[in-house]
Image (tube, rainbow, N blue to C red):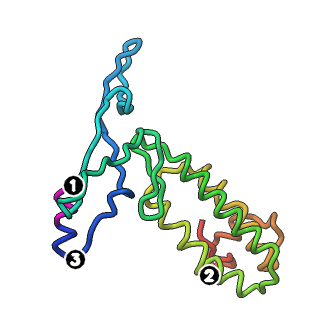
Amino acid sequence: QRWQDLLNVSGGDLSLPKCKVGFANYKFIRDNHTDRVSIKSIEEDPGDIFLQPYDQRKQKICLKRLQPWEAERYLGVRITLNGNHMEELKVRREQVSDMAEKILQSSICRHQAYMIHGIQYRPAIIYPLQHVMFTEKDCHSIQKPIINALIAKMGFNRKTPRDVIYGPTLYGGLGLTD
């Protein structure tokens, strides 16, 4: 409610029907002499949050409540309360695969392939990677299709050693980032 009031003072307003809320209420589980912690689901910890629109004549609006495992997109990245990034991984794999398909079907030259890597692909993937915790294996599975497409358009064999692909240009590498 306070955030909405602050926004209104500065000339803004929340779109309450778009707002969502998740509770990080923990439960502690002792199982076979091991302790675990998890976040309670809506069924385990019921309750709703209502916000009053700035116009006091309007009815309070109930915010949609998210389950701990339910991914919600915030500033372009899908985040869950329980830290599971599988939905974001799925979306990034699809995004990069679509980019790779478009590159393979296009008639771009070598120089344009380098530019796509630096101007389109890297910014699209670097920002989300700062907000999630993918394993190195996950990251390689995301980038594999586009790197293969780009190096093919750059005139190199897809089987070119990755040391050459990611190596610095000073030593004869392509200088692509891994």
Q: What residue appears at the point 68 percent right and 76 percent down from the top-left corner?
A: 173
Q: Is residue 165 magenta?
A: no
Q: Nearer the viewer, residue 72 or 87?
A: 72
Res. 170 mark: 2
- Cα distance, mark 3 to mark 1? 17 Å
Q: Which residue is mark 1?
A: 52
Lower position in the chain sequence, tag 3 or tag 2: 3
Q: Cβ–Cβ below 8 Å for labels 3 and 1?
A: no
Across and down, in percent, residue 174 comes to 68, 77
- Cα distance, mark 2 to mark 1? 61 Å
Q: What residue appears at the point 75 percent right and 74 percent down from the top-left corner?
A: 103
Q: Is residue 154 left or right of residue 81?
A: right
Q: Is residue 31 left or right of residue 162?
A: left
Chief secondary structure of the magenta portion: helix
Classify the position of the C terminus by image quarter. Answer: bottom right
Judged by depth in the image, the label closer to the viewer, 3 or 2, is: 3
Amino acid under disc 2: Leu
Q: Which residue is mark 3?
A: 11
Amino acid under disc 1: Gln
**Element type at mark 2:** helix
Residue sticking out furthest to the front: 57
Res. 161 mark: none
Judged by depth in the image, the label closer to the viewer, 2 or 1, is: 1
Q: Cβ–Cβ below 8 Å for labels 2 and 1?
A: no
Across and down, in percent, residue 36 comes to 37, 25
Amino acid under disc 3: Gly
Lower position in the chain sequence, tag 3 or tag 1: 3
Judged by depth in the image, the label closer to the viewer, 3 or 1, is: 1
Q: Is residue 37 left or right of residue 174?
A: left
Q: Is residue 36 above or below residue 140?
A: above
Q: Which residues are magenta?
A: 1-5
Classify the position of the N terminus by image quarter. Answer: bottom left
